[in-house]
Amino acid sequence: MLKLFLWLRYLRKKKIVLLSIAAVALSVSLLIVVASLFTGFIDAFEQSAVETLGDVVLAAPSPFKFAKYELLVERLEQISAVEAASAVLSAPGLLHVGKGDVHAVEVWGIDPARRARVTAYKSFLVRQKASPGEPSFEVMDSPEKTGGFVGIGVLAEPDEMTDEYDFAAVEKMLGSPAVLTTGSLIEDKGPSSGGSGRRFKRRTIPFAIADVVFTGVYEVDRSVAYLPIEQLQQTLHRDEGGPVADRIQIKLAPDVDVEVALAEIRGVWQVFAMKELGWGAYLANDADIETAKQMQSRWVFELKKQMGLLLVIFGVVSFSVVVLIFCIFYLIVRLKQKDIAITKSCGAASSSVAWVFVGFGACVGITGSCIGVVLGYIITKNINVIEDWIRIAFGLKLWKSSVYMFSKIPNQVNWDMALRIALLAIGAAIVGALIPALVAARTRPVEILRYE
Amino acid sequence: MHWAQSVLALRSRMYKIILAIRYLIRCRITYFAVLAVALCVWIVVIVMTVMTGLVGGYKLKNHKFVGDCVVGTKSLVGFAYYEDFIKMLEDTDYVEGVSPVIKSYALAGQPGTGQDIRLEMIGVDPARHSQATGFAETLHYHVDDVSKVFEPREDGGLSGCVIGIDRILERDSNGRYTAGPYPADIEVAVSCFPLTSRGALVKATTGLVNTKTFYYSDHSRTGLARVDSSVIYLPFEQAQLLCGMGGVPKRVNAIHIKFKPGVRLQEGCQDVSSLWRMFKQAKTDESQSYLLDAVTVQSWRVHRRMFIAAMEKEQAMLTVMFGFVGITTVFIVFVVFYMIVSHKRKDIGILKSVGVSNANIVQLFSGFAFLIGVLGSSIGTVAGWLFLLKINRIETFLFERFGFQLWDRVIFFIGDIPNEVEFKVLAVIVLSAIGACLLGALVPSLQAASLRPAETLQVGQL
């Protein structure tokens, strides 16, 4: 009770203590904001991969394609771990979308209805996201035309200041003609093959823009075009004699053990590759079967490393808080020598006196951490608003999707890190209070209270 | 007389210096203020040196990539009459090198794999481009004779091409590439859309695309990730034909300019801009003059601002964050000075009783704060400098021993960690640290100045 009384008294009377609380709060909030923004970015990075690619991607070894993908999709969907699967055929291409407007793109041959079952694809379509039914390549008012989807970044650039697309202008381009050129290796025994028996053959595919894809991931939006998989297959691989794909994107059933699911998918693939495709075990094993998150793991590792580094740097600077608390507590101990001496002369043990200051240090740490956590939460949650204020006030756009991939700053608070940072701050406050507490404990009443 | 006045003035100031040094030595609590300042300066010197080095290096690479000034258009259609404008530029006394450039997107048969890749195609005259930019320095096999960069080793009747290094070689964990003694015998089939001056496809009724095969003759390493992984350089005339720009009048997408030494960037760009306006005026009646409307004159900084601004903003944000954390140092100095003023009330009382003014008391404590700032900054700077000297060795040791790298060199285009301390950056850090100390000491100094000797020296207080 005495300790609590003294803590409250010091907190009320010694305004200088507020400085240490402010310093703790400042450091805690800064570290929480940094950690939350980084982890939010990493989570968004991983989530965007899942939303774009599905949970698991089965990719044929480059440059092979595989036939009978419909059978493989059917077999995969039969296993309990898989909810849905969709085939993709990809190729690089040049896309001509208007006068003098050419873009280098990756063209994906897809079945939009199937793809929508594997990823959040329908929600990305500017025209069809609100329409009932499954998405399709059908061109509005011209169903006879070959339709295709184009990433929003191919048709427009986000505004320099607001980083937002002009959707009205983009929607006007629906139905516009576009021409895609791509190429494939074809069998050729002539001299142009250079003796290899194969040479490149350029192919062009004219189509109408049936919809625009806005995933919110800048690189995807500016560099991917989508065509019907059959159309792309007929253009690029007409010699194959049947449908081909180069990867299968898979959505896992809820609450499935990922490792078990991967093993099951691998099993289905190997049987399919060896029996249906006639591939050898080596080639079949060479296929990549990974989760979308595993595919990003190298980048995620680097991002986590950079986050750790930044936290260490700010942690080192925040070490000043320990020094500050030491100084303030030392000041209090020196100024309150008489109080301490009276307390000890009334029978309080040295350890009790030390605990008063250690406990007070913990109080400062807890109060500062709580304020810091609240401050960190408010800043993180409103980071997009703050960024917008900075843009309005200073004309400075800090966050651009062209640089940081996403159109919005991820604003989820990392509570796990927040708890660790708060605990560390409390620990630091206790460390800072330790030496002054020992000095207080060693105070000798007879020296302080004598009258001379 | 003058000398005597100087001595008197010095003696009148001496007590401030003596007291400040005395407080610094005697009051051990000030060591903590020095420690806090040193810690902050140490970490800020390290981080800002590395960051400044990275940003500076990145800017230099961008500068070398485009030259000093770019006259160009974003449209892939390009603009005509460039030869006349180049002649005008060459006649001026401030231009050292001029290079017309074709830029477009191309689809290329990937070297060695037989697969297609998307590339950014740049058509240049290698000798001219090297006079205007740092192109020659980026080459591997033809660094000494850039004019022959498009001459392949094998004379198969094909022209050579220069490919971005990351498209042709693998980077190891130290960020190094291993190139053979000669370029490998690789054919690259390059295709692109030829466009009319109105932007339409040239071959609307035939094959739509132009394709031409080249031999890989060299690779280019600019140190810019996006460039080295996506660029293919082709001979100027052939690139012009591939893009449908070789008709009459011929077109280009950009003109890269290098100014003579001593010409200031802004002034040079303004001169080029004036010249362009005159040129555009003179060409008003030409058939393709409408293409000139989309052409802009930009300095390299403006031309590459999308890439550079991002790094500069990150550096600025880091500085702001350090500023926030640095507030703690101001608090520490404040607390230390508050303690010292509390303990030295008698000293202050005596000083004031012998006629020292309030301003002098403030000066005394400000001088003391300045001393703490200088000492802390010096310790922090020396410690930071020593750490930076060894930073690459430390990283190598950590990598060899624990597999830890600050930046994975396979992913990031970073060589050695920059460790050259820039005087300007250092000066800003040290001045900020001293400023923080002065700020922290301000309120206690004013408190000290407001003390009344009659109260601090009365017997009850003694």
Image (spheres, helix red, strand yellow):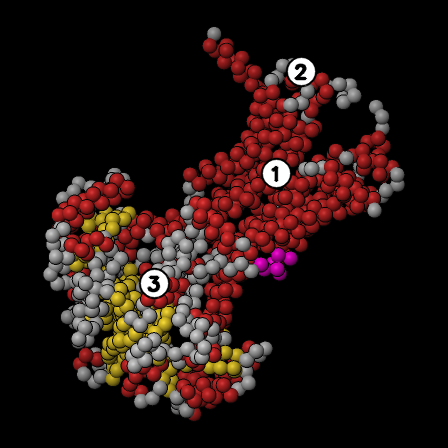
Distance Cα–Cα, label 3 vs label 2 = 79 Å
Task: Please tell me whether the stretch drawn in magenta is mainly helix, strand or loop.
Answer: helix
Q: Can residue A7 be seen in this snapshot?
A: yes
Residue corresponding to mark 1: B331
Residue B90 lies, in percent from the top left, at: 15, 46
Q: Is residue B352 above or below residue A293?
A: above
Q: Decide: few, some or many residues near mark 2? Use Cα within 10 Å; few <14, some 14-19, many ≥20.
A: some
Q: Which residues are magenta?
A: A413-419
Q: Quadrant of residue B193?
A: bottom left
Identify the residue at horizontal 84%, vertical 38% (top origin): A343
**Do the residues bearing badges 3 and 2 touch, measured as CB atoms within 8 Å?**
no
Q: Which of B226 and A401 lies nearest the eye of the viewer?
A: A401
What amino acid type should be assigned to the residue bearing mark 3? Ala
Foreground mark, 3 or 2? Answer: 3
Q: Amino acid at mark 1?
A: Phe
Q: Which residue is mark 3?
A: A169
Q: Secondary structure at mark 2?
A: helix
Q: Which residue corresponds to mark 2? A: B353
Q: Chain of mark 1?
A: B
Q: Is residue B122 above or below residue B347?
A: below
**Residue A255 vs residue A322, the one in the foreground:** A255
Q: Chain of mark 2?
A: B
Cβ–Cβ under 8 Å for marks 2 and 1? no
